[in-house]
Image (cartoon, grey):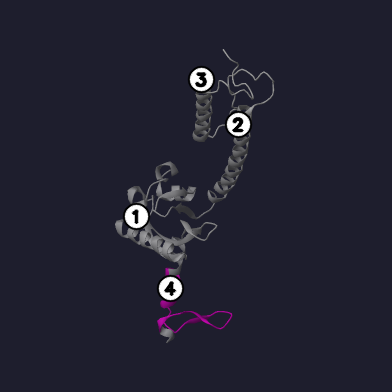
Amino acid sequence: DPPLDQAGDCSNLYDDGHQRLITNHLQSISGHLTNFASTGKFSQLELQRKRPRSGENDELDEVVNSINKMQIGLQESIAKVQRGDDRFRAVSDNMPESLTLKDLDGRFMLVNKQFETWHGVHQDEVLGKTSAALPTLGSDEEVRTLNSQDERRVIETGRAVLFERLIRLNDGKQHWLRVSKYPVFDSEGNVTAIGTSAQDITEQRRLETLLHDAVESIPDGFALYDTDDRLALYNENFF
């Protein structure tokens, strides 16, 4: 048999034996790249082949070397992104607020620990799904419709919206949430996702109600001004 992959010798390049060798090498390279793409795990690419008579690297060696260098570079980039994701996850999971990220079709891309706790779900049950497909989130149809409308407005206007809404959480109770929905832009200024942060203000609302009732119970007119002499609190008898 003629030498395999002999550098500079193309006389038998297209005979059946060499064609099979070339096909086998290409299939090995393709399979290696497919495995790397699906698993993200690096492994050195090596081909089972006879060396050229000259002992020097030929074009096939250069392809293999380039692929191995590319894998190393990709793996370093993946590791860098993963470190950034881990840091973000550590920050978001320690926030007292609920935090989510949805794509433009309303599918969850990210949820933090507070969201999981409030709704009694794990991120694996949520990611890739819409709120409508997750009745366990506790929101009734009206709330889901309002949320969808708010998110559509964010996409269309590119502006954040802020509101307070009463929502049933996993503890079975109704909670007042102060919600902010905001656009996430790409480098060209296009809206690519919708972020949502929510703060439980149930206790704050309760205290405000108590304060209001206490002020209204004063038989005389009552008013409170801030440091800029602006009217901040008053009862009906004040007027």
Residue labelled with disc 3: 15
In this picture, residue 26 sits left or right of residue 65: left
Q: Residue furthest top?
A: 1
**Upstream in sequence: badge 2 or badge 3:** 3
> Which residue lies at the image location 50% right of the left edge and 24% below the top edge?
23
Q: Earlier in the sequence, mark 4 or mark 3?
A: 3
Amino acid on which the number 4 mark rests in the picture: His
Which circle, 2 or 3, is nearer the viewer? 3
Give the labeled residue for mark 2: 63
Task: Measure how far apart labels 3 and 1 are at the Cα level.
Answer: 69 Å
Mark 3 vs 1, N-terminal side: 3
Front position in the image: 12 or 204 = 12
Quadrant holding the N terminus: top right
Residue 239, by quadrant, is bottom left
Mark 1 or mark 2, which has the lower sequence index? 2
Q: Nearer the viewer, residue 162 or 62?
A: 62
- Looking at the image, is 27 positioned above or below residue 102? above
**In front: label 1 or label 2:** 2
The mark closer to the camera, 3 or 1, is: 3
Mark 2 → mark 3, Cα distance in angstroms: 22 Å
> Residue 215: x percent and y percent?
44, 76
Asked if one can make out residue 153 in the rendered structure from this viewpoint, the answer is yes
Q: Which residue is mark 4?
A: 212
Q: CA distance from mark 4 to mark 3?
A: 93 Å
Secondary structure beneath label 4: helix
Q: Which residues are magenta?
A: 209-236
**Distance between the alpha carbons at the discs numbered 1 and 4:** 29 Å
Mark 4 packing: few (<14 Cα in 10 Å), some, or many (20+)?
Answer: some
> For mark 1, what is the residue?
139
Residue type at the position of mark 3: Asp
For marks 1 and 4, the one nearer the N-term is 1
